[in-house]
Amino acid sequence: MEICRKEYVGRMFSRLIFLGIFALSMAKQAIAKPIWDAQSETAFVELLCADESYFRKCFEVTQPVCRKTLRQAVKKCAGVTKGVTEMIPLHTKMGLCVGARVEKSWSDRKSASTDCRNREKWQ
């Protein structure tokens, strides 16, 4: 009886070790996986180019032009996502970089409206 119990405990212990190693390897893969991908880019551009968005309300641009320009800005800002492992700081960094680039390139198209000139309204 004692031998069967020892074998059972030994097998259970081996399984627990295996599960622990497996869980650790999965966690490392999850951390290593980039959190900014093509889906993130598409969602980001769509959000910023929606009809009621800051870029569409405060700049005289069509939605296709907005999307194209923002995609280009996202590609140029890709470096800001390196090393960031949390979604919120990543989107904040990307938003600041993209926003600055687009503001600069579209400065001649910006509305004179007070709401568009007041940065606090859009942060």
Image: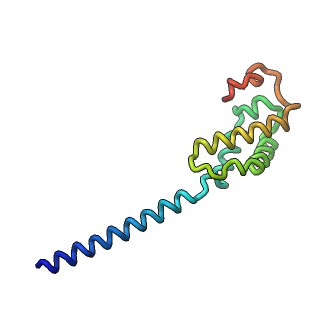
The residue positioned 19% from the left and 76% from the top of the image is: 6
Farthest right residue in view: 108
Left or right: residue 66 versus residue 36 is: right
The residue positioned 21% from the left and 78% from the top of the image is: 7
The residue positioned 64% from the left and 50% from the top of the image is: 40
The residue positioned 61% from the left and 56% from the top of the image is: 34
Image location of residue 30, percent across then percent down: 52, 59
> Is the N terminus in the top left, top right, bottom left or bottom right quadrant?
bottom left
Image location of residue 116, percent across then percent down: 76, 25
Look at the picture and state if 25 lies above or below 106: below
Image location of residue 117, percent across then percent down: 77, 23
> Is the C terminus in the top left, top right, bottom left or bottom right quadrant?
top right
Q: Quadrant of residue 122?
A: top right
Farthest left residue in view: 1
Look at the picture and state if 55 lies above or below 115: below
Q: Quadrant of residue 10?
A: bottom left
Image location of residue 31, percent across then percent down: 54, 57
| Colour pattern of the rendering | rainbow
Left or right: residue 5 versus residue 54 is: left
